[in-house]
């Protein structure tokens, strides 16, 4: 292969670096072979690459070790690319390049406004991916980060300052309660399963531990509900889990 030793350093835009530290890329791709090819190309282009095979691991990995860019496959087993994207967007405006298997899906993605920065359709050449990564990173550099405040009903979740206000009264939440509430408030009316909420709250979720969510919800209600016994914000969806009210 003529590609084995490209002049990696020369491909890079030096201005992208902070004191010589390479940008890091998180690859989320369940096809192991494809993930490996991407990793090889990106590493040769000078990036630090981490790779995970499913959505839950992606969210968990990112929370512990934020990357400079995420290359995210849309069709993943379990939590799909859209869910991963939403989770990441709650706490970060990291550039996301969505990878889809079908051209038709790109229209759907744009319509959903999930906040991906670019799309790549399979099959693609790894070199095209490297070029897109470079372009998106360059663009992201000059972009000021938007204020991130979520609002629904009378509840305001300030992601930057990590504070919660209920009708202008501040509620003091634990980090787990904060993440839970942010997930719920971001999508009022959406019924979340306990497993989804566990993933949202802790970045990882194990079957069998879903019920721990009930305890967190109980504490959260005690802190934010006018009447915790008759909740008006965090509603129980019987047989499913919980949702935030979509009434204003
Ligand atoms: Ca896939």
Image (cartoon, grey):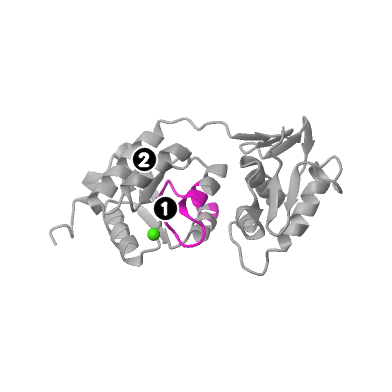
* Earlier sequence position, callout 2 versus callout 1: 1
Please determine whether, in this image, residue 65 is positioned above or below residue 211. above
Please determine whether, in this image, residue 112 is positioned above or below residue 146. below
Element type at mark 2: helix
Q: Is residue 123 left or right of residue 233?
A: left
Quadrant containing the C terminus in the rendered view: top right
- Under 8 Å from ligand 1: the CB of mark 1? yes
Q: Is residue 21 visible?
A: no
Would you call the spot at circle 1 few (<14 residues within 10 Å), some (14-19), or many (20 or more)?
A: many
Q: Is residue 151 magenta?
A: no
Residue at left 27%, top 51%?
A: 45
Q: Is residue 215 left or right of residue 131?
A: right
Residue at left 63%, top 60%?
A: 195
Which residue is label 2 attached to? 137
Which residue is label 1 attached to? 74
Looking at the picture, how far across and down is residue 23, in whole percent? 38, 47
Q: Is residue 72 magenta?
A: yes
Ligand 1: image quarter:
bottom left
Q: Is residue 192 left or right of residue 71?
A: right
Q: Toward which corner of the image does residue 210 lie, by quadrant?
A: bottom right
Magenta part of the protein: which range? 63-85
Residue 26 vs residue 53, the one in the foreground: 53
Residue 215 vs residue 24, the one in the foreground: 215
Looking at the picture, how far across and down is residue 211, in whole percent? 72, 63
Residue at left 57%, top 43%?
A: 90
Element type at mark 1: loop
Residue at left 65%, top 48%?
A: 179
Tell me the CA gap for discs 2 and 1.
Answer: 20 Å
Q: Toward which corner of the image does residue 38 lie, by quadrant?
A: bottom left
């Amino acid at each position: 292969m003529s590609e084995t030793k490209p002049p990696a350093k020369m491909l890079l835009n030096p201005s992208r670096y902070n004191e010589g530290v390479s940008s890091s890329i998180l690859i989320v791709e369940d096809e192991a072979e494809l993930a490996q090819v991407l990793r090889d190309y990106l590493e040769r282009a000078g990036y630090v690459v981490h790779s995970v095979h499913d959505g839950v691991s992606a969210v968990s990995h990112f929370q512990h070790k934020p990357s400079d860019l995420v290359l995210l496959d849309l069709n993943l087993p379990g939590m799909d690319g859209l869910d991963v994207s939403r989770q990441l967007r709650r706490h970060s405006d990291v550039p996301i390049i969505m990878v889809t298997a079908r051209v038709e899906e790109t229209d759907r993605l744009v319509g959903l406004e999930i906040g991906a920065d670019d799309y790549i359709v399979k099959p693609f050449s790894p070199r095209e991916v490297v070029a897109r990564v470079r372009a998106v990173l360059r663009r992201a550099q000059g972009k000021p980060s938007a204020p991130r405040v979520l609002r629904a009903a009378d509840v305001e979740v300030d992601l930057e300052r990590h504070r919660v206000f209920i009708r202008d009264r501040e509620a003091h939440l634990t980090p787990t309660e904060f993440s839970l509430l942010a997930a719920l408030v971001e999508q009022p009316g959406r019924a979340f399963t306990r497993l989804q909420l566990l993933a949202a709250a802790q970045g990882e979720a194990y079957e069998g531990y879903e019920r721990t969510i009930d305890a967190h919800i109980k504490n959260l209600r005690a802190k934010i509900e006018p009447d915790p016994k008759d909740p008006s914000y965090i509603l129980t969806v019987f047989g499913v889990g919980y949702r935030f009210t979509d009434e204003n």
